[in-house]
Amino acid sequence: MLSSYGPPGYMTDFDSVPGLLGDWSKAVSGWFDEAIKLVESKPGFSGQRCQYYNQLKQDPGPTLEQPVVWNAFSGTSLRRFGEAQAMEVGETVMPLSERQDGQGVYYTGPAWAKLFYRPHDEYCEWRVDRDEEGRIMRVTFTSEPPEYWQALHGDDLPNLNGEPTYPVPGDPQLLLELYREYVSPDVELEDLICSEDLVEEAEQKTLYPKGSYNPYNRWNTTDGLMHLTHPANSLAAEIELGGVATILRERYGRRITDPDALICGTRYGGANRCSDPMIGCSVNELAALGCWVTLRDPVGLYMDHLDMTGWEKPDGSPVEPEYFRILRGKERFIERAVFEVPSSEGFTVSDVTIGGVPIRYGGQLAQHITVRLVGLAAEPGAFDPIPLPCEHSALIDPANPEYLIQPRPERGPQGEEITAFDYPDVAS
Amino acid sequence: MNGAGAPGPEEPLLEVDEIQGNVLPGFMKPTLALCALQIEDAQLAKAWIREIAGAITALSETLESRKRVRALRTYEPLAEGTLGAVPEQVDDAWANISFSCTGLEKLLAGGAYEGDLERFEDPGFRAGMAARSSLLGDPTDPNAEGNAANWIVGGPDEEIDVLLCIGADNAARGQQLMEDLRGTPEGSGMVTVYQQEGEKLDQIGSEQFGFQDGVSQPGVRGLTAPGEYLTPRPIASSAIPESWIYGLPGQLLTWPGDYVFGYPSSGPDPRLPGPLATVGPQAPDWTRNGSYFVFRRFRQDVAGFWAFLAEQAEELSQRQPGFAGWDAERLGAAVVGRWKSGAPLARSPEADDPSLGTNRLANNDFGFAAPSVQLPLEGGGTTPPFPLAQGDPIGATCPMAAHIRKVNARTAGDDMGGRQPSFQRRILRRGLPWGPKLENPEEPDPAEGQRGLLFLSYQASIARQFEFLSNSWMGSDTNPRSPSGFDLLVGQNGEPGQGGKRHAILFGKNFEVGEVVANDIFVIPTGGGYYFTPSISALREVISA
């Protein structure tokens, strides 16, 4: 039996804060328990046992690791805007009052229009630093979850509904030092905290109380990058997705195995992303084998590697692998990394080509980053799960037939859209 | 039917007299001849193209012959080892023609269509294969055989302008057609810089390593006449949704725009049409019914491949009990995902089964995500009762690194999202082996290693399909699914600083994890190029105008 959940990426910042490692583990354990309860509360699930498990409370025996991998460049932007525009969108930040994936908002209320996130919804975000001539000097990537930074500040960590729930001791000074080390020496602690309650007004829910850490602070959005900002990019969301995806689904009497049909029928994530359909179907396939399923400790989202095949210097020779440096985390568990050409080389990132095409956007690099989490499966055949009916459906707009629309209640009138996957699934 | 929705919109009517016949339905002939040309005088070249345009074979002509073949043979082998045998009554010789970006530049220069190439967006087509060689993972060491500078054809600054492709039942007839088309070389304004013939090595269409090739060609949707599908649909219409989704059992249907411009491509729902395929947002009208064509000349180190398999299998079987009894053939099947006969590991995990490998109603009927089922067929009966595939999400039966799983995740998800990206990256393969078959890799080789594959493929995007498959899946140690490693058959490791070393993760009995490592590549690129294969009318009215 696992004795505690460690911090993501084997990072060591928590070591110097008394009690933080233990309380972090309690929070992760709590998220698993919440996800399990969520599964058990699904309509029609009663009578079945949840296959998702908390490693602090359950030990089903030897496990098999399954890394689940996906591309870092936003599938949502790619399919919604096309590649050229998606590259441009990837260079910007968007207000939280504007969704990346269509009409509507992430949070309601005027405060959110002044707070920003990066439209990078694959659990990997980046920031491009340019010189005065617009040449790219470096591209910095992060896969660090916001909860880690809330913990460093000592805030109550949110539950799966985003409500402050799990108390942890923090060290705001350490938080500040890390920001100064990785983002800017100009950062002040007051820049990082909420000057007012940040309230989701539609639900009258305070997500970030006054005085707590503000994940959308300017040094992590408009003026720098420290950790993930996209509302979908949280550790709790990953744990929830892993749990809900253990439920098998059926339509017209046939189990759904198509990853796209599955995510549309369950809405456990964004259907147009690279990540969520892949995570969901991978978990679901293991659940179908009757396995216990969970996420490997340390639970986190990681950059696996940057593939530099075909990347060339101005003289046509291959780039040096050292241009890509891991700053936080470790090999295959990369939490923060930078791609930068040493000044001694006499050229910049903009002079590097990929297949002969000069780098103009950070997204070109992201297209070559593989992100991953690691699933664990144990005891195949331990369960004989019964599929539940789908709870949702998705639409396809003939004007952009590559893009799946997952209708939300607030969505306006429908057009010429067609219901997708409205038939039984193929058997394999 | 259980209340399921309608089968979906009608499929598009293909312009059968416009699309060149090797694009759709594909020549699929036992012999192949390629002739690479460089333009020296564009006006003479255009006159030559106008002259031969009438001899370029369209989809309609190819399909008529294909229908005769279909009528003369069944999906199941008449006798073991006879798959692919073309009836003697069929004797065709066909020609197609394609142009590189440099070739089109020369031919369109000074004419009404001169600026149109700017509207071709594909970076692969625009730059050419040699310029993109390192992106494919090819060796960057200038001394390596596979480095583009050492290619036999299509190397840097030696880009082919025009590629003629002949397919024939009879090699002599194919050669005659080639000679007829070339006519008087000096009169055509072009010089021949490379010629090569390829042919089927045996009755089942094995490639040089000895594995049946081309088993899982994608099915292509579309009508060739009202009510007539391009791709036969032998599954009973009562089987929903399989009869909507498959051509042959397991042959997932993709939309024609994945290969031919001017038609819808695959979208999220395989039943519904996706975006219209074009060469770019401002695509010239004349690119409709055209396709991108990839030629890649590979030399195959057959002796080296089998020596590698024998050595690694022996080490693995001695080192790890879960791999006891593994030999070169068993490891080879894991590397390919099929046994030599074509029988998929997914349906025959322990040993080869030639009757399965040559049965087209069964040899492609499997998935990786969930168990397969037996299907009813039109006219009665069911798919053959070979053991069905089981769900294999971690690659315990068919490794994630297996070639067939690298290039085609089928209905399973992949790193680019759900199932949709896998469908959008399919290619139509049209290649054949070159050089003599090496009967015994352990004996002296009279051909001194000179054999390989003339790889040919059609697709609507070179960057997103051919190059992506090479670079991002075959040449990745993690993608499209993990735990994986590289495609040891064709994939290359082009990562700077890694010396081309490749590994693959395998599972033995009781989920025991094993790893094999290859320091060399066995499929070595020795030439190639990227081309546009225009419609018949574009050939007449634009390219030769």
Image (tube, coloured by chain):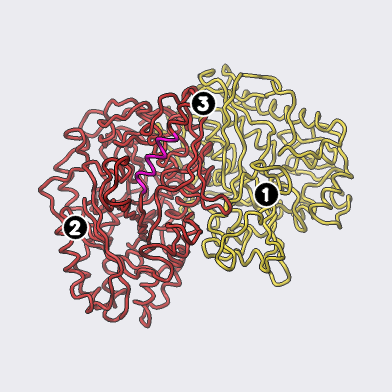
Chain colours: A yellow, B red
Q: Position of residue B75 (x, y in %)?
A: 22, 37
Residue B306 is a magenta residue? yes
Q: Which residues are magenta?
A: B301-312
Secondary element at tag 1: loop
Q: Is residue B105 above or below residue A336?
A: below
Q: Residue at x 38, y 80 (%)?
A: B109
User: Which chain is mark 1 on?
Assistant: A
Residue holding disc 3: B512
User: Which chain is mark 3 on?
Assistant: B
Q: CA distance from mark 1 to mark 2?
A: 56 Å
**B396 or A321, which lies in front?**
A321
**B397 or A149, which lies in front?**
B397
Q: Position of residue B396 (x, y in %)?
A: 47, 29
The type of residue carrying mark 1 is Val
Q: Is residue A42 above or below residue A93?
A: above
Residue A20 is a magenta residue? no
Residue holding disc 1: A105
